[in-house]
């Protein structure tokens, strides 16, 4: 796998290779002893053929976002919702004697 990553890096850094056609890359990959997955991906123009070799694991987006102001919006919605009563701070107990 590290050879495949190194070859992909070399292709990405060299403009002549990066913009080369599959037919132009085929002999270069053969000479570099590229993996079958890389040669197949280049020939088909389909990078998904490298997923197994590179250990691809689907990356699912989280369902909760941490956007700025997210909590404030939720609080506002709660206060406007008829099911929730507004929060009032508790009043001090004036019946207890103060310690001096």
Image: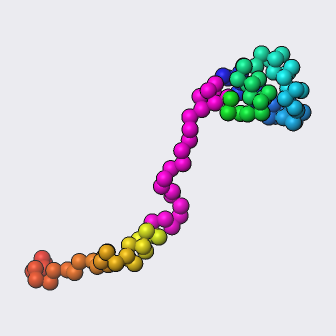
**94 or 74: which is nearer to us?**
74
Question: What residue lies at 70% left-to-right and 23% top-to-bottom?
Answer: 37
Segment colored magenta = 50-71
Q: Residue at position x 84%, y 23% from top? A: 26
Q: Is residue 52 magenta-colored?
A: yes
Determine if the magenta segment contains residue 54.
Answer: yes
Res 71 quadrant in image: bottom left
Q: Is residue 31 above or below residue 11?
A: above
Residue at 30 percent of width and 77 percent of height: 85
Rendered location of residue 100, percent (x, y): 13, 78
For the point 64% across and 30% down, the residue is 51
Q: Does residue 10 appear anywhere in the picture?
A: no
Of 99 and 57, nearer the camera is 57
Residue 54 x, y percent position in the rendering: 63, 28
What residue occupies the far front of the structure in this picture?
Answer: 44
Image location (x, y in percent) of residue 43: 79, 27
Majority secondary structure of the magenta segment? Answer: loop
């Amino acid at each position: 796998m590290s050879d495949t990553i190194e070859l992909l890096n070399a292709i990405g850094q060299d403009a002549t290779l990066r913009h080369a056609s599959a037919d132009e890359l085929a002999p270069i990959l053969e000479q570099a002893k590229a993996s079958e997955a890389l040669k197949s991906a280049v020939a088909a123009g389909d990078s998904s053929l490298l997923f197994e070799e590179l250990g691809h694991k689907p990356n699912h987006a989280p369902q909760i976002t941490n956007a700025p102001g997210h909590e404030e919006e939720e609080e506002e919605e709660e206060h406007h919702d008829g099911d929730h009563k507004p929060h009032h701070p508790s009043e001090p107990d004036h019946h207890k004697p103060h310690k001096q």
